[in-house]
Amino acid sequence: MRKELKSRLSVIIHSPNHNTDDKLLKICQLLDQEIDYFNWTGFYFRNGDKEELVLGPYVGAATDHAVIPFGKGICGQVAVSGATFLVPDVQKQDNYLSCSMDTKSEIVVPILKEGKNIGQIDIDSHEIDPFTPEDQELLEWICDELAKVLV
Ligand code: SME
């Protein structure tokens, strides 16, 4: 299944006919559609040289967290660490920014371009501990592929 999903994602990522925001939104839509427990799927990007993230394309409920300072929440911590952060149960995290009462778990994967942390993909789930190693591998693969096409 993941192999087929990757090939569909690859077509989107490397499409010459779509601009970056279109590609990012289509990735969110496809993941949201194909993986039941992905209940909010979106991107955040570093705001120029500022130590803050800004919300990019997403699918899911509107969020109050359109701007996140580095270090704040799961996203802000990944902006600093440059490492995947898997949170099986958000209630057990002190440094967490709640977007929705329904969210029970979250995974954030950085997009590293030439070693620089330029943004991230963020997935929230309404289930506790749903994310598999296969999900993490898929999201890291997406971020690696995106790093090749994002400027
Ligand atoms: N929960 C995130 C904030 C972003 S929302 O999930 C869309 C965090 O703690 O960084």
Image (cartoon, rainbow, N blue to C red):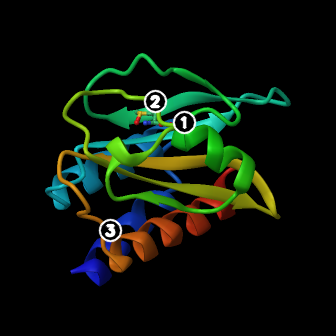
Closest to the camera, between mark 3 and mark 2, is: 2
On the image, the x and y values in percent for residue 49 come to 85, 30
Other residues around mark 1 within 10 Å, as few (<14) / some (14–19) / many (≥20)? some
- Which residue bears the numbered disc 1? 73
Q: Would you name the residue on which mark 3 appears?
A: 8
Tally the numbered discs: 3
Q: Which residue type does callout 3 highlight?
A: Arg
Identify the amino acid type marked 1. Answer: Gly
Query: What amino acid is found at the position of numbered circle 2 in the picture?
Result: Leu
Going from N to C along the chain, the mark reached first, 2 or 1, is 1
Residue at the extreme left: 36
Identify the image quadrant of the N terminus. bottom left
Q: Nearer the viewer, mark 1 or mark 3?
A: 1
Residue 97 got which mark?
2
Sequence-first disc among 1 and 3: 3
In contact (CB < 8 Å): disc 2 and disc 1: yes
Q: Secondary structure at mark 3?
A: helix
Residue 134 seen in this snapshot: yes
Image vertical order of residue 50 relative to residue 138, above or below: above
| Mark 2 CB near ligand 1 (8 Å cut) | yes
Q: Residues within 10 Å of mark 3 (few under 14, many from 20)?
A: few
Asked which quadrant contains residue 113, the reply is bottom right
Q: Is residue 45 left or right of residue 60?
A: right
Residue drawn at x 33%, y 58% is 88
Q: Residue at x 26, y 62 (%)?
A: 129
Please say if the residues under marks 1 and 3 sit with CB atoms less than 8 Å apart. Answer: no
Residue 53 badge: none
